[in-house]
Image (cartoon, rainbow, N blue to C red):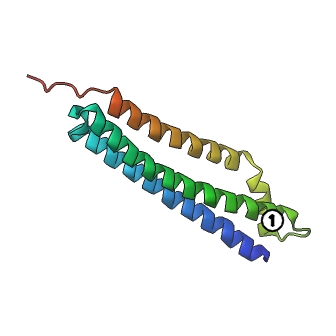
Amino acid sequence: MTGGDLIALVRSCDQQIATLFGQMISITFAMIAGIYYFLNRARLPLKFFAFACYGVGMLAFFGMTLREANIKAVALASIDALGERDPVLEGLHELSHSWLFQDTAFFLNAAHWVLWLSVIYLLFFWRKPDPAP
């Protein structure tokens, strides 16, 4: 692959990861709305069923995100292996080893945990307050 192809591949992976993460946020907010409006009063079997459905969707999106992240890692390794790089490839190479890439990866991973933990807390531990008199 040429340098331009590798840059396009890295950018394509970033776009796909952003789209998949947006979908994960969407299904989490849908789950939170469901919890607020009716699952907070449901019995435990229905809560477990709802969580299992949510979990399957989240794991599917998470698996696709990991696939894209691995493709991106291979593309970045290919850029690293190129002997002579043009300025754009060199900039991407340096950026991929910077604090920005590392911190972004950390916060993306942390966000996945926050989404899961927030749904678990709201579904199994949170109680909707009684309406004001």
* Image coords of residue 23 (percent x, y): 43, 56
Q: Residue lying furthest front in this view? A: 45
Left or right, 67 with respect to 94, comes to left
**Amino acid marked by disc 1:** Ile
**Residue at x 23%, y 35% (from the top left corner):** 42
| Screen quadrant of the C terminus | top left
State the SS at label 1: helix
Q: Residue lying furthest right in this view? A: 83
**Residue at x 74%, y 55% (from the top left corner):** 95
**Residue at x 62%, y 59% (from the top left corner):** 67
Q: Residue lying furthest left in this view? A: 133
* Image coords of residue 71 (percent x, y): 68, 62
* Image coords of residue 124 (percent x, y): 34, 30
Q: Residue lying furthest top in this view? A: 133
**Residue at x 72%, y 58% (from the top left corner):** 73
Report the number of discs: 1
The residue pinned by badge 1 equals 79
- Image height check: is 106 above or below 59? above
* Front residue (pair 51, 114): 51
Left or right, 119 with respect to 99, comes to left
Q: Residues within 10 Å of mark 1 (few under 14, many from 20)?
A: many
- Image height check: is 89 above or below 34? below
* Front residue (pair 124, 32): 124
* Image coords of residue 77 (percent x, y): 80, 60
Q: Picture quarter containing residue 13?
A: bottom right
| Screen quadrant of the N terminus | bottom right
